[in-house]
Amino acid sequence: MILRPLHISLLVSFLCFLWTSCQKDKRDYNVQLHQLPTELALTDVYFISADTGFVTAGNLFSAGLVYGTTDAGLHWDTLLQTGQGCNSISYHKNQLCISECGNKFHFTDDFVNWSYYSSSGWWRWHQHTWLPDDQLILVGGGNFGDGHIHQKEPGNNKLVRSDSIQFELMDISYCSNGKLITVGYGLIMTSVDAGLSWQISPIEGDFFRGVDFPTNQTGYVVGEYGSVYKTTNNGQDWQKIRAANSIFSNQSTLLRDIAFVNEQTGLIVGRNNTVLRTDNGGKSWQKVENLTDPVDINKITIAYNKAYLAGDYGKLLILNLDN
């Protein structure tokens, strides 16, 4: 077949369309990879300024570590060593707070001298949150089941189990006016009374790993196999905006966490360098392609226009969201 000028013009236009369409599915960032002085998996990350941040690391039964940096991640100092894994961080009223698997919740106001709250029994906490009245709530579990919720009331130094459920709980977020959302193995649960009681939302499927509320009304939940749910009414109703599919059923790309800059812009992270971005409230997602070193990413925090990604083997990635 002889290609005439019109045919060539149409072919070029079509190829350009394909190229630009593919480009819309990709996103690159200025990425910094920091190797912390450990081979343990990093489990959480939290920055309180552009320069000062903290990371937890640990193995469930044998070791836990807390690191701190004051130069945006160039150097890290060991702040705390524990006998079992440290899984979550918060910074509440000028105190750095760390949960340790077992029965201790550590806190410090000078990053040198540590105190802790304790509970009876042994528990695998995954995440915690604070309420405005200084109430602390921790969620956890193991083996997809044996979920548990612990609370510490203001003025009480003991962590008390407040609820149990037959599903492992992975993450928790405070919305507003006493409302809490926790997620886990096959369920999303809501409390409207500051954790005194919980209701299971009519959501089916997936092992939900992360929840994030960029505003009081708008929140997102991500499942391990790729499903994403969204609420625009403070958790009363959830709409599936991304279905789990064969692409994400691959064990090498299981998803782990979600975080948003605002109602429209957010990131999902997971195994094998999986980082996806949306700029339209979850209607479409772009894959970040320029993560060259293979990292299984466990947790993400967004602050100061950067995304901090905690990975396995002591690897921390920092994405500059300006570009």
Image (spheres, rainbow, N blue to C red):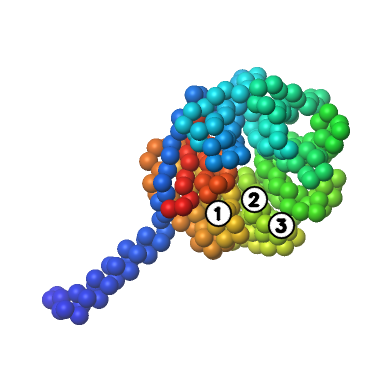
The residue that mark 3 highlights is 216
Distance between the Cα atoms at labels 1 and 2? 10 Å
Q: Does residue 164 lie above or below 2 as drawn?
A: above
Residue 17: quarter of image: bottom left
Which amino acid type is marked by label 1?
Gly
Residue 161: quarter of image: top right
Left or right? Give the position of 138 relative to 39. right
**Percent position of residue 303, x then y:** 57, 46
Q: Earlier in the sequence, mark 1 or mark 2?
A: 2
Residue 244: mark in rendering: none
Q: How many marks?
A: 3
Left or right? Give the position of 49 relative to 21. right
The residue that mark 2 highlights is 212
Residue 266: mark in rendering: 1
Q: Earlier in the sequence, mark 3 or mark 1?
A: 3
- What is the secondary structure assignment of the residue under circle 1? strand
Q: Residues within 10 Å of mark 3 (few under 14, many from 20)?
A: some
Q: Are marks 1 and 2 in contact (CB under 8 Å)?
A: yes
Which residue is more in the foreground, 222 or 29? Answer: 29
Which amino acid type is marked by label 2?
Asp
* Quadrant housing the N terminus: bottom left
Distance between the Cα atoms at labels 3 and 1? 16 Å
Q: Does residue 247 lie above or below 54 as drawn?
A: below
Q: Is residue 184 visible?
A: yes
